[in-house]
Image (tube, grey):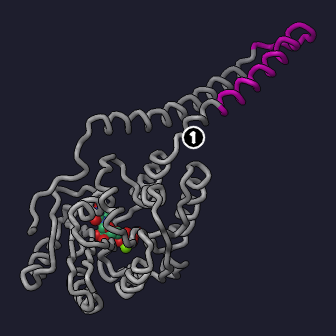
Amino acid sequence: MNFSVSVVIPCFNEKDNIEILYRHLSMILEIYPELELIFVDDGSTDATLETIRSVAEKDPGVRYISLSRNFGHQYALKAGLDHAGGDCVISMDADMQHPPELIPVMIEKWREGYEVVNTIRGDQKSLSVSKKFSSGLFYFIINRLSSVEIKPGIADFRLLDRKVVDALKQFSENHIFLRGLIPWMGFRQTSVHFEPAERHKGTTKYTFTRMLRLALDGITSFSSRPLYLSIALGSIIAGIAFLYGIYAVYVHLFTDDALPGWTSITASVLFIGGIQLIMLGIIGIYLGKLFIENKKRPNYIIRAKNF
Ligand code: UDP
Ligand code: MG
């Protein structure tokens, strides 16, 4: 086989998962002579880096990048992709939820001519009801709001052709959301299904707030439609206020019960104030992104690497 394979694995406090993942990967991917495994230590505070180092000492095919702090999953992935040298590059989680056995299947698809092989996770039992619900809601909203189609259940477990990785290197935007960016990029894409396993050791790094942040990034990086929300809502409210104004004039001119309308004034002021704050918030999010983007900061900073 005259092609090389890279596997990129972002790790944040995954010390108990690295060795078992390494054993599985090297067993399953033995058939590919030119193989590199790139572990990206995303500022772990446990012995993750030491574990990776000890694995790397025994196997020259194991590389690592250690980031200077926790930059987040998407940036750790980006760091790994930027440094991967393979003709095809696979990214996967460190916690054994992404089955290594699927990689040869993905490579087969790539050999058939696909440039991106996505994976879609099946409806697993291990997923909590709340995660299922929030992820369902997220995909529903993002697909209504943005012009790229993001398939529900798409995982950050995918194969990219060299061409795609090179194109991705040119992206330096912050707030990366690869699950949206990759479909947006085009190329010949396909997907395979898998049933995710239970996390081997440790706990999920995606707390509710982190998921919410990822979801907001996903939506606001791929659509400016929420900005138009203010126009729509504003016009509806202005319309209602106008009608109410006519009614108030009518009451004043033609009836005797024009009491000082304290209640209605308070209610409408509060209501409009609330809407304005929401709209300011939406505008603020985009403005904040412009501010960050404008600095053109690097996506991540590397402290150490062995290649
Ligand atoms: N991860 C990372 N940096 C972070 C959070 C997560 O590199 O700040 C890695 C983590 O080590 C794992 C992958 O991203 O390999 C997916 O995270 P996790 O399994 O916690 O997410 P879940 O599967 O629960 O959605
Ligand atoms: Mg996981």
Q: Position of residue 42 (x, y in %)?
A: 22, 63
Quadrant position of residue 32:
bottom left
Describe the element under mark 1 as helix, strand or loop: helix
Residue occupying image coordinates x 63% and y 27%: 272
Residue most extreme to the top:
253
Tell me the chief SS of the magenta region. helix
Q: Which amino acid does label 1 sit on?
A: Arg
| Closest to the observer, 294 or 69 | 294
Ligand 1: give its quadrant. bottom left
Asked whether residue 150 is drawn in magenta, I would say no
Q: Which residue is found at the position 33% from the left and 34% from the top?
A: 291
The answer to whether residue 51 is visible is yes
* Local crowd size for mark 1, using a 10 Å CA cut-off: few (<14), some (14–19), many (≥20): few
- The quadrant of the rendering that contains the C terminus is bottom left
User: In the image, residue 112 lies at what x, y percent?
Assistant: 44, 80
Q: Is residue 8 above or below residue 216?
A: below
Q: Which of 1 and 282 is in front in this view?
A: 1
Residue 255 on the magenta span: yes
> Which span is picked out in magenta?
232-260
**301 horizontally vs 73: left or right:** left
**Vertical order, 276 against 222 (above or below):** above
State the residue position of label 1.
Answer: 225
Count of numbered labels shown in the rendering: 1
Q: Position of residue 236 (x, y in %)?
A: 72, 30
Q: Which residue lies at the image location 75% right of the left edge and 25% below the top edge?
A: 239
